[in-house]
Image (tube, grey):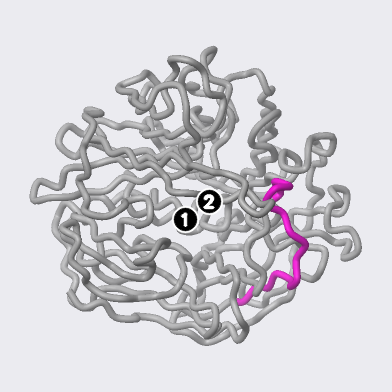
Amino acid sequence: MKLTALREYHLGSRLGQVRSVPVRFADRPENAVLFVYSSQPNIDPWPELFSFPKDTLKMALFSESGMLLWERDLGPGVIPGVWFTPFISFDLDGDGTDEIWFLNNLNPDLPFSLNARVLERIDPRSGKTTGRWPWPDNTIDDTMSHSYRFYITGGYAQGEPVLVTAQGTYANMYLRGHNANMEKRWETVIGKDDGARASHLCPVLDFNDDGVDELFWGERLISLADGRELFCGDKGRYLGHSDIVLPFVDSKTGRKYIFTAREDYEQEGEPRVITYDEKGERVWTAVDSLGHMHNGWLANIGEDCRKIAMAMRINRQVINNAICDTEPTDFYFDAVTGEALERPLPFQGSQYMPVDFDGDNRHEFCAVTGENAGWVRDVSGNYIAYLGGEQVRSGKLLEHPGEQMMLFYPQEGTVRIWGDPEAKEVPAFTQRYQGPYHHLMQHFMGTGYNHMNSHVSCGM
């Protein structure tokens, strides 16, 4: 395997963070790629991680082949952070061109104002604003970390597009569905004592095959048709928040599952890792009682493409007056049976992201942190290629065989998409991409941690 930079985009400034989504055009021969970026690294609303920004957040739209179409500086009122400023590309009006939707702040002097925040729509053909709607201030009395957790996503109900906006992750949560004309379709409020909280990522797909997409809102499924709850796993037992929620299919039986890894609400005898079936019932559990399970992924390994699940327990301590991540603990399981696995990889899996570059339905692993950051390795630990850079998103990013990895290069101000020019897709790989899930989720990589938790590469 010889990995090559298939695309390159020059953003023209030093980079501390980059997020990206594809943008489709109905009337142009080439689609586009949106980058939202800053020289300032990501800012988190948790006071122990918050820092005052030293740069503004920018937008730039490029043709897929690399030509700059337009750019925009969002100004000092918009805090350059995942949770402060979500964005997606989504064709809500059904004209075949994706609108760009993002959370803007119209007061440059009050970056924490909730009253000045608006949901804004941009026409990607011109880069101009075509609509603004007030953003609800219903988290205004929460703590800082709870107040500034915002989401934008979407999906389809019997073919009709539905845009979803949401506020809240750890306490009260507020979700609203919008029709094509931006009229309110439904509104749902989930009280802080009503079951599991939200996750840091939110897959959207038709999980029960009823023609309506469901939003995976933590360990509960919400119908995009009317906002009702289809089920909530461990309701009455768990009131916490799951960092990881990954839907997947057992290719041997066709059965669907949901792999979850929990952050908080540690209770004696209650598991930190749970996999549910398609009805929200427990299938297997692991890691009892204690531990902030901060990261996880699913990957196919070995000749039989065994699907394994990784859950990482983060360990933190205060060093030099700052909270620091120390050596984590990784746990591995057979994703279907829950059988615990002892070191199925010869490296620390939580430092890597699975990506199937060559399309053989078995994942390679790209290191996104640690001493081997930037290296791609196979399941045996062999080094394949050094890509360098920092993670933007992964999955099927181009009309090119196999999956690709998008990385940004801080000093160069450049983004590259890496892939295997000789990739050939086996039928099992092609089958994974027949449904709309993977393609739709690429458009939602600007919301939460969708871009960095690999469910696009390794989920359904």
Judge from the rendering whether residue 244 lies leftward or rightward of residue 94; answer left or right.
left
Q: Is residue 149 above or below residue 276?
A: below
Residue 118 percent coordinates (x, y)? 79, 54
Judging depth in this view, the residue of 294 and 223 nearest the camera is 294
Q: Residue at x 57, y 51 (%)?
A: 324
Q: Residue at x 29, y 80 (%)?
A: 4
Q: Is residue 372 above or below residue 379?
A: below
Judging depth in this view, the residue of 440 and 159 nearest the camera is 440
| Residue 58 among those drawn in magenta | yes
Residue 401 percent coordinates (x, y)? 24, 68
Q: Residue at x 82, y 63 (%)?
A: 77
Which circle marks residue 396 in the picture?
none
Q: Residue at x 39, y 52 (%)?
A: 454
Judge from the rendering whether residue 342 lies leftward or rightward of residue 69; answer left or right.
left
Residue kind at label 1, given as amino acid type: Met
Q: SS at mark 2? A: loop
Q: Which residue is mark 1?
A: 452
Dividing the picture into quadrants, the one containing residue 269 is top left
Q: CA distance from mark 1 to mark 2?
A: 5 Å
**Decide: marks 1, 2 in contact (CB < 8 A)?**
yes
Residue kind at label 2, given as amino acid type: Tyr
Q: Main secondary structure of the magenta part?
A: loop
Residue 67 percent coordinates (x, y)? 52, 87
The residue segment tinted magenta is 45-60
Judge from the rendering whether residue 124 lies leftward or rightward of residue 205; answer left or right.
right
Dividing the picture into quadrants, the one containing residue 142 is top right
Q: Which residue is mark 2?
A: 449
Judging depth in this view, the residue of 254 and 51 nearest the camera is 51
